[in-house]
Amino acid sequence: MITCASLDTPYQVSFSNAAFAATCDASPDKGGAGQGFRPHELLEAALGSCTAMVVRMYADNHGIPLAGVTVRVSLDRNHPDGPAFVCAIELAGELTDEQRRKLLRAAKACPVRRTLSRKLVFVEGAGS
């Protein structure tokens, strides 16, 4: 569970999972100080991080000599079919074409991607 709490600086929010914390903020053009991740960047980070982890796990489990993986994600909210995550995956290492294909196929199994691909439901919890 993530807990988010507003801070004294307008539009800044601290978020934490009880072990780690970071700051979210609006950009200056939206009235914020620009001193943290923007909310949509957190969605991009969740997808990119999960994808990189899944690719690394697949490579490790299948003995593929992956030296590194870089995932770049942007959210295109002007896409004609609705919001679209645009993902670019770079694989580093001495990989065969077949190993690259397998790793890119594995990337599609990212649990965050699967979650974001489904119909989302929002349940409002009781406030305290």
Image (spheres, rainbow, N blue to C red):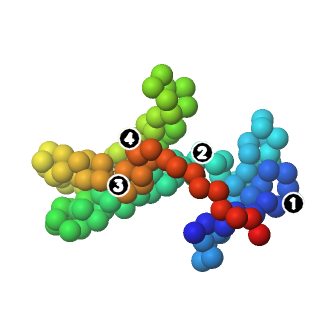
| Relative to 90, 106 lies left or right | left
Q: Decide: marks 3, 4 in contact (CB < 8 A)?
A: no
Q: Residues within 10 Å of mark 1 (few under 14, many from 20)?
A: few
Q: Rounded to the nearest whole Å, what is the CA distance between mark 3 and mark 4?
A: 14 Å
**Labels 3 and 2: the sequence-earlier one:** 2
Residue type, numbered disc 4: Ala
Q: Rounded to the nearest whole Å, what is the CA distance between mark 3 and mark 2?
A: 19 Å
Q: Secondary structure at mark 3?
A: loop
| Residue position marked by numbered label 3 in the rendering | 110
| Residue position marked by numbered label 1 in the rendering | 8
| Relative to 53, 123 lies left or right | right
Q: Rounded to the nearest whole Å, what is the CA distance between mark 1 and mark 4?
A: 37 Å
Looking at the image, which residue is at 48% across and 22% down? 80
The quarter in which the N terminus is drawn is bottom right
Residue type, numbered disc 1: Asp
Q: Nearer the viewer, mark 2 or mark 4?
A: 2
Residue 22 visible in the shown view: no
| Residue position marked by numbered label 2 in the rendering | 40
- Residue 88 shows which numbered tag? 4
Residue type, numbered disc 3: Cys
Looking at the image, the residue that sits furthest to the bottom is 19
Residue type, numbered disc 2: His
Q: Residues within 10 Å of mark 4 (few under 14, many from 20)?
A: few
**Labels 2 and 4: the sequence-earlier one:** 2
Q: Secondary structure at mark 4?
A: strand
| Residue 127 place in picture, x, y as percent | 74, 65
| Residue 18 place in picture, x, y as percent | 63, 76
The quadrant in which residue 110 appears is bottom left
